[in-house]
Image (cartoon, grey):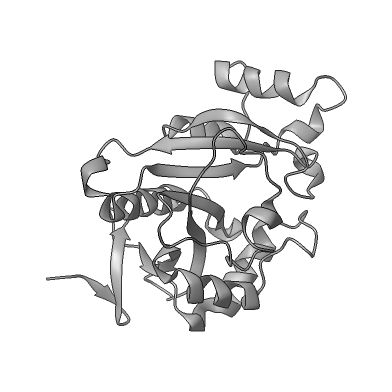
Amino acid sequence: MTATFIGRQVLATREDGRYVVVQAPADDAPALEAVQRACFPDLSEEEIATAGHFLSHQAHFPEGQLAVLDTDTGRLVASSSDLRLKVDFAHYAHPYLEETGDNLFTTHDPEGDWLYGADIGVHPDARGQGLATLLYGARHDLIRRLNLRGHVAGAMPKGYGAVAHDMPIEQYVLEVIRGERRDPVLSVQLKRGYGVWGIIPDYLEDDSCRNHGVFIVWRNPDYRPEAG
């Protein structure tokens, strides 16, 4: 029997049952915007995802729009947004808004064989609860269900801004890969099995990473080419 919470199918659950992952419907759009603004106060207004953007995400690819609910309160406390793309690994360096169709997901390709991680955020009030891990697990489950090649994203190296005057971004990323330096975003993603493919200049407008993105890749170990 499929588990549900307030009428929604539960896609993943924290071990103690306190938090669940569900598909985000249209009614969640205002709450999704609230989480986005709380998570990314340094993002420019042009790049922040509003309720209207989230509605567009849901219209183009509803399966890729996930939310975490607190089962005690029903409050939406975290979310992730994904779309499907065909990836040209020789030309991966694209600005975020170009890759996501101005954050509307008009670039979603129903035949795309990679899941592109446009966004993930946990409200500051709910951090440290393993919610990002829940969302990544649900994303990887979706990749397996759809038999996609894997997951790609532009990670924000948010620790770089503090040391940018001391080193180029290439050196910073290399030190993070080697474990010589910890980045609050990239280090966590590397521990989840993602690898660094390259650096994206002018990926987005955020001073904490000096506008850089890091193109990361997780390959689906269960991908079946013959079933694609």
Could one spot residue 224 in this view of the protein?
no
User: Is there any visible trace of residue 228 in the rendered image?
Assistant: yes
Vertical arrangement, residue 180 with respect to residue 38, above or below: above
Q: Position of residue 27 (x, y in %)?
A: 50, 84
For the point 62% across and 37% down, the residue is 91
Question: Could you tell me residue 4's position as x and y percent?
Answer: 25, 74
Q: Point out residue 159 in the picture as x, y percentages from the top left corner.
A: 71, 34
Q: Position of residue 50 (x, y in %)?
A: 67, 72
Q: Is residue 141 above or below residue 181?
A: below
* Of the pair 1 and 201, the residue shown nearer to us: 201
Image quarter where the N terminus lies is: bottom left
Image quadrant where residue 56 sits: bottom right
Task: Tell me: 62 left or right of 205.
Answer: left
Residue in the image at 45% along x and 30% along y: 191
Most foreground residue, 90 or 172: 90
Outermost residue to the right: 165
| Count of marks placed on residues | 0
Q: Quadrant of residue 48?
A: bottom right
Extreme residue in the left direction: 1
Q: Image height check: is 145 above or below 48? A: above
